[in-house]
Structures are given as C-alpha cells and as structure tokens.
Image (spheres, grey):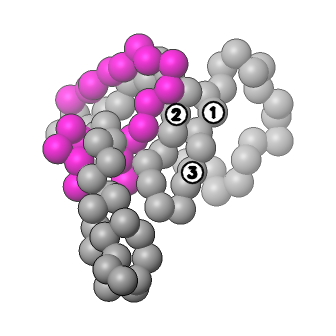
Amino acid sequence: MPNSPSETPRPTGDARRVKVQRRGPLLVEGPVEVELEDGTTVSSDRFQVALCTCRRSRRFPWCDTSHRARTSGTGEGPAAKD
C-alpha cells in the first residue's frame, strides 16, 4: 500500500469518500463490502455506513455507538460526572 496519495487522478465515480473522526467511526459512502480478519465478507447497500474503529460494537464491523459509553477518566464525554 502506498503511503502517499496517487499522483494519477482517478475518475470520481471509482472513488469512495471516507470521513475520519477523532472520536468515532469511519464514515464511508456506500454501498460497501468489508473483508474481516477471518476472511469473511460483510456488505451494506446503505448510502453511508459507519465502521467501528474502537472494536466495542456488538455489530462489528458496523458501529453501534458503543464508543460513546467509554469512561476515560479525563472528564470528557457523556460518561463524565460533574
């Protein structure tokens, strides 16, 4: 895999847009197919899917917002207590 973007422009119809968020899932324009570590493939025909990056999701690789319940002890997020 290259470490830098290709210098050759690709037609926009071939590319998928992926949105990276600091504290959340990867948002990918669908439809998508995801190959898991064990070689199985899962797919979604939705217009946008959220892929779990924290591995807490019960529906992995799809995000179920389990990352929101994390208690970090930093005083940030919905789990923080005042």
Q: Secondary structure at mark 1?
A: loop
Task: Relative to 64, say whether 73 is above or below.
Answer: below
Give left or right: position of 4 versus 49: right
Give left or right: position of 50 versus 20: left
Q: Secondary structure at mark 2?
A: strand
Q: Position of residue 37 (x, y in %)?
A: 24, 44
For marks 2 and 1, the one nearer the N-term is 1
Q: Specify the amino acid type for callout 3.
A: Val
31 or 70, which lies in front? 70
Q: Secondary structure at mark 3?
A: loop
**Is residue 33 among the parts visible in the rendering?**
yes
Q: CA distance from mark 2 to mark 1?
A: 6 Å
Residue, disc 2 = 28
Q: Specify the amino acid type for callout 1.
A: Arg
Contact between labelled residues 1 and 2, with CB atoms less than 8 Å apart = yes
Q: Is residue 7 magenta?
A: no
Residue at 29%, 42% in the rendered image: 64
Residue, disc 1 = 17
Q: Position of residue 30 (x, y in %)?
A: 50, 22
Q: CA distance from mark 3 to mark 1?
A: 10 Å
Q: Position of residue 57 (x, y in %)?
A: 23, 48
Q: Is residue 48 magenta?
A: yes
- Stretch of the chain drawn in magenta: 40-60
Q: Residues within 10 Å of mark 2 (few under 14, many from 20)?
A: some
Residue at 32%, 58% in the rendered image: 67
Q: Specify the amino acid type for callout 2.
A: Val
Task: Relative to 50, say whether 76 is above or below.
Answer: below
69 or 26, which lies in front? 69
Residue, disc 3 = 20
Q: Position of residue 75 (x, y in %)?
A: 40, 83
